Amino acid sequence: MKTTLRLAVLALAAAALPALAQDKELNLYSARHYQTDEALYANFTKATGIKINRIEAGDEALLERLANEGANSPADVVLLVDAARLAKAQQAGLFQPVQSAELNAKIPANLRAPDGSWYAFSTRARVIVYNKVAVKAADVDTYEELADPKNKGKVCTRSGAHPYQLSLAASMIEHLGEAKAEEWAKGVVANMARPPRGGDTDQIMAVASGECGVALSNSYYVARLMRSTKPEDKEAIAKVGVLWPNQADRGTHINISGGAVAKSAKNRDNAVKFLEYLASDQAQAYFANGNNEWPVVKSAAVKNPALEQLGDFKADPMPVSALLKNAAAAQKMMDRAGYK
């Protein structure tokens, strides 16, 4: 009898082991591919004992995977690096709302979903980079001026279908209305020095070489080159000027890197803990000091010489939710404008 009872107890304990192990796990789908994020994950595990199982891919690939997996998806947390992609995931019902007093207290209202379905954890600005010899700063200090005929044959950007460009286009719709925003997009296309191609670093290098007079770039690409010790990077960054667009009016467009709890999350409590950890001063400092992004939590300590050199700027206070609202219209507008 005692043996039978002992075996039954052991069987119950063995059955509980997977659940206990799962309690200490978190499945993360991340579109962030920055080496500096390794410290983020390691410190979370050290502080909580929760192991992170990570899958990394581009935003689009992760969203397709989530959609295909449906309710069977193992994902607990999803990290994406653009407002337009967050919009797509939210509209597809891939996230679930989170009600966290800690997140709501730390993250400004314009940088989170009203229902808690996603939160921003870092921001990056869409800056204008210009050739200091070939272009006058005063001629390119607003996004609107990129469409001005005076800049014909000077503008370079990455693809109009890229999320960074689509988010900027969505902001133009919000500020100008769709008709005027489309005129702007057509003007930018008419002013291009070459068809859109490459990433943001390629745009900066093309401006430095003189192939382009002016280009758009996310701020952290500029900061990365500023911090580089490579001679070619130092030479390139010395040839370009960097502008915060629209300082006399609405301010510079910002985009976000954000996170959400997956609709299918099996480890929901761990997922919320992880999002709350990303809003901690320690984690926020990694975003700033490691990947040259701005933290969304103002109390985080930033010690980044490149960000300090770039200086303060007036950011567009537009709620990110407005970018999400205009995301689909922005894509259609860019297509109509011939923005390849």
Image (spheres, rainbow, N blue to C red):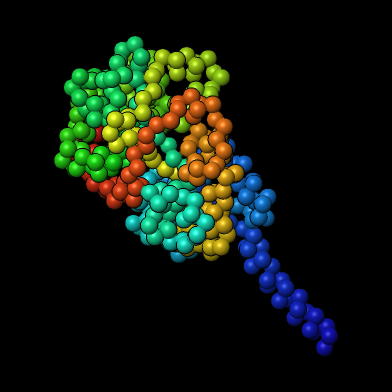
Q: Residue at x 22, y 34 (%)?
A: 185
Residue 99: percent from the left, percent from the top? 47, 62
Q: Residue at x 54, y 54 (%)?
A: 276
Q: Residue at x 67, y 52 (%)?
A: 47
Placement of 114 over or under 34, stated as above or below: below
Q: How many marks?
A: 0
Q: Look at the image and tell me in which quarter the N terminus lies.
A: bottom right
Front one among 67 and 94:
94
Residue 205: percent from the left, percent from the top? 41, 20
Placement of 273 over or under 156, stated as above or below: below
Residue 160: percent from the left, percent from the top? 29, 35
Q: Does the rendering let one see residue 69?
A: no
Residue 291: percent from the left, percent from the top? 52, 35
Quadrant housing residue 301 = top right
Q: Residue at x 45, y 44 (%)?
A: 257
Placement of 226 over or under 254, stated as above or below: above
In the displayed image of the protein, which residue is found farthest to the top? 133
Judge left or right: residue 197 versus residue 1: left
Q: Does the rendering let one see residue 102?
A: yes
Judge left or right: residue 161 versus residue 272: left
Placement of 314 over or under 256, stated as above or below: above
In the displayed image of the protein, which residue is found farthest to the right? 2
Front one among 311 and 233:
311
